[in-house]
Amino acid sequence: MNERKLQELRPRKTFAQHWLKSEKALNEIIRAAQLKLGDRILEIGPGTGILTRRLLPEVQSLLAVEIDRDLCDKLAKEIGREQKFLLLQGDFLSLDLPSLLAQFPTFQKPHKVVANIPYNITGPILEKLLGTIANPNPEPYDLLVLLLQKEVAERLVAKPGSRTFGALSVRVQYLANCELICTVPAGAFYPPPKVDSAVVRLIPYQIEPPALDTRKLDTLVKLGFSAKRKMLRNNLLSVVERDRLTQLLEKLDINPQSRAEDLSVAQWVTLANLLL
Ligand code: SAH
């Protein structure tokens, strides 16, 4: 689509609409999705359908959820007749996908997610797709390829000990293996967002060993990261005595002066399990 056509589509700010126009970024997304002809894809926010059109010929089925009625009408006219395409109009966050899909018995549940998501609801979308530490999605997707804000992407793929490793890193990495595919400059979109973007690939997994009490782990992570510059043993005072924590950390071969961002996800789990 050329720039003028994109402008005619008058992007809506409230829906965080930024149309991807970079062939390079599209190619990266498609490659990262490792598509097979049997794949059943979920796309959130198809917008003008630029990614949708790339995905369709390569997969068995594609379910797209778009909140904007006008865009839905347009997409339905353009590609709505494709048998393997199902377009649902609504807010992805409040849709009950399983019960909606029950109305389309020939349409199988998607097992991969490929999407350029609306950045204003990135956190809630991640939570809906992956679940939470205490409440993981019981039917996890096999793979998710998402185009999102670069700063969020960096937190998702951050390694322990780095400045960007935070509560979000632990929460998501507990549920999925996270990989940075590429960064995408703001100029790759019309209109350009205020921030740069990045493509990430998340592969949900069952962490080993799992947390025995996931709620406990959730609370620990929340408290641990609550005051960033403080040592872990100070942030966790309300759940464990200083001396006991020092002992536990030494037992785990972790420096007792560590801060929350120094512990790996596995270490967080071990610590939570020892604190039961
Ligand atoms: N995939 C398109 C558009 C990305 S912009 C492209 O790459 O060009 C984000 C899209 O998400 C917009 O189409 C917007 O209308 C849609 N959107 C925003 N909030 C949504 C929600 N809650 N549920 C579903 N779609 C939403």
Image (spheres, grey):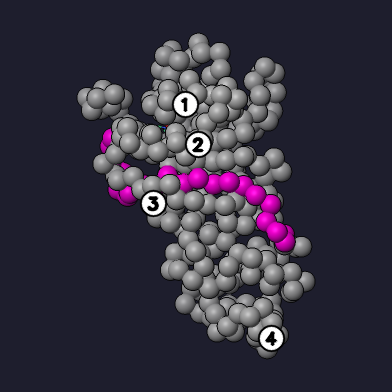
134 sits to left or right of 67? right
Name the secondary structure under disc 3. helix
Name the secondary structure under disc 2. loop
Give the residue at mark 1: 55
State whether residue 157 appears in this view: yes
Q: Amino acid at mark 2?
A: Ala
Which callout, 4 or 3, points at the residue further toward the start of the chain?
3
The answer as to whether callout 1 falls within 8 Å of ligand 1 is no
Confirm or deny contact between disc 2 and disc 3 (CB under 8 A).
Answer: no
**Snapshot quadrant of residue 247:** bottom right
Confirm or deny contact between disc 4 and disc 3 (CB under 8 A).
Answer: no
Percent position (x, y) of residue 117?
Answer: 45, 39
User: What segment is highlighted magenta in the picture?
Assistant: 190-210
Q: Amino acid at mark 3?
A: Lys
Q: Amino acid at mark 1?
A: Leu
Residue located 42% across and 29% down the image = 51
- The label nearer to you, 1 versus 3, is 1
Which mark, by number, is residue 150?
3
Residue 154 vertical position relative to residue 237 in the rendered view, above or below: above
Give the residue at mark 2: 33
Percent position (x, y) of residue 214?
Answer: 71, 60
- The label nearer to you, 2 versus 3, is 2
Which callout, 2 or 4, points at the residue further toward the start of the chain?
2
Which mark, by number, is residue 246?
none
Which callout, 1 or 4, points at the residue further toward the start of the chain?
1
Q: Quadrant of the C terminus?
A: bottom right
Confirm or deny contact between disc 1 and disc 4 (CB under 8 A).
Answer: no
Give the residue at mark 4: 247
Which callout, 2 or 1, points at the residue further toward the start of the chain?
2
Gap in Å between the C-alphas at discs 2 and 1? 10 Å
